[in-house]
Image: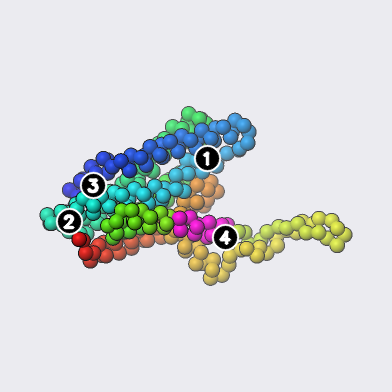
Amino acid sequence: MSKLIYANLVRMIRSKVFWVSEIFLTGYSIFVYAMGMINVRNNSLTINNGWTVYFFNEMLFIHVVMAVFIPFFIGVEYSDGTIRNKIAVGHTRIDIYLANVIVCYVAGLLQFITYSVVSALSALFFIGPYALTSMGQIPWRVGCSLFIILAYTAAFSLIAMLDANKARAVVIELVLAFVFVMLVMQIYSDLQEPELTNRVVMSETGEMVLEENIPNSKYVSGTKRVVYEWLDACLPEDQAMYVIDPETVFSVKAPLCLLGESVILVAAGAYLFRRKDIK
């Protein structure tokens, strides 16, 4: 399988889509910190430890970048007949599948590294060392980011390997990326609702009175909360929200869920690819 991985790595380096994504991430990182500098200078924004939102901002849209790159990268093998040739010379379908998944994951890691390196340089240039030293729990945030990228790779590679049509695979994966966003808007926001809240009401005398520690009708409890918490741990886009949140308290639950989800998707994809009729 090492030869397959090497060949795929060479093809990745030569991929125009890969380099377009690298240029986009570089430009976006510079833009983000330039806007941060402008906001701070105008005294319209106090960042403090919120610089994690800037440094890890890529995690909010990395799935869109991967949803475009992966089907194009894998789709070329179908359009050029490369997969048939690999099978003809004796490579197993499992090796072909895993080699593609591994290189797509490497591409995701390189995109993450590119954004991180440029972000560090941009932070120093536009803001100063404080933009980097003020961030907390960096090992956790980086580790979770790697598991998030792995989960996206497993899901998008499965679709791209089973659908030989590049354009259709891109559309499907972009729709899936949009679904991820819609789910995170619902689940993440619901889980952030506090159990108790405060409200201002008008008393009988006509005065405005603050009532504290009132049960919050929007608070998710019971079985629904348990389901939401497991979905929250398994959805990579939800975890991306925690990565950029400077107040997040991390646990091993989410990384383990993302890892287990990735293993299941890769195993299912390899099994289905073995049974796929490659014309």
Residue with the mark numbered 3: 8
Whether residue 147 sits left or right of residue 41 in the image: it is left
Label of residue 51 in the image: 1
Magenta stretch, main secondary structure, is helix
Q: Which mark is residue 84?
A: 2
In the rendered view, tell whether residue 42 sits above or below residue 269: above
Residues 63 and 143: in front is 63
Look at discs 4 and 2 and give the one toward the viewer. Answer: 2
Reading the image, the residue beneath label 4 is 190
Label 4 close to label 3 by CB (< 8 Å) = no
User: Which residue appears at 33% of the width and 61% of the height?
Assistant: 265
Q: Earlier in the sequence, mark 4 or mark 2?
A: 2
Q: How far is disc 3 from disc 2 in space, using C-alphas?
A: 15 Å
Give the amino acid type for the residue marked by disc 1 in the picture.
Answer: Trp
The answer to which of marks 3 and 2 sits earlier in the sequence is: 3
Residue drawn at 33 percent across, 53 percent down: 167
Q: How far is mark 1 from mark 3, CA to CA?
A: 36 Å
Residue 262 screen position, x and y as percent: 35, 58
Please report whichever mark, 1 or 3, sits nearer to the chain's N-terminal start: 3
